[in-house]
Amino acid sequence: MPSEFVVILAVVALLLLLSRLLVPALPLKGLSARLTTLDFSLAAAGLLGLILHCTSMFYRPLVASIPGSTAVISQINSMGTASVIWYVVPSLLLLFGLRRQNFVVLTVLAAALAAVGVTMYNGAALSTHLNTAFAAGLVIAAIMFLLVVPPWQIKPELLSS
């Protein structure tokens, strides 16, 4: 995975985070949803699992520095059933954690995660998979920074449900 890919995605995510911190109109009223502590925990676990999956594939030495991670890296890189499980479970955790979001938002996220899975496991060109993963990363960052109201943020005007 090219370093530029990671840097550009990180910069875009940082810009979205800065927007969230500096623009009073964010999160977008009407599209945003407040997460419970459980929702937030599930979404965070899903994100961490997806990061582990990608990092195990493209930055093995980084994950290998974690004691006991060799078996996980091997399972993920085998591209077999275990690898699929290591991708699908975090994806479902993320979707379940964000289930209170707008239906269209969840549908876009589900489609993005499915596209990443398909391009990863159907033998698509690496460039196709990386472009799909980049788009999914943007979708996730946009949802997390523009639409999610964390459990600790209490603004009465955002609590419509």
Image (spheres, rainbow, N blue to C red):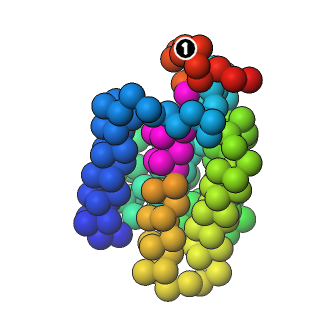
Toward the viewer: 11 or 147? 147
Task: Report which residue position mark 1 lands on.
Answer: 154
Q: Give residue 90's position: percent from left, percent from top.
A: 64, 47
Where residue 158 sits, quadrant-wise, is: top right
Q: Amino acid at mark 1?
A: Ile
Q: Looking at the image, is 32 positioned above or below residue 77? A: above
User: What span is colored magenta in the figure?
Assistant: 140-149
Secondary structure mainly formed by the magenta segment: helix
Asked if residue 123 lies left or right of residue 11, the reply is right
Q: Looking at the image, is 160 positioned above or below residue 136? A: above
Q: Tell me which residue sits at (51%, 71%) in the image.
A: 132
Q: Tell me which residue sits at (54%, 16%) in the image.
A: 155
Q: Give residue 109's position: percent from left, percent from top.
A: 63, 55
Q: Tell me which residue sits at (26%, 57%) in the image.
A: 7
Q: Looking at the image, is 151 positioned above or below residue 86? A: above
Question: Is residue 9 something one can see in this rendering?
Answer: yes
* Residue 90, magenta (yes or no): no
Instruction: Name the quarter where the N terminus is drawn.
Output: bottom left
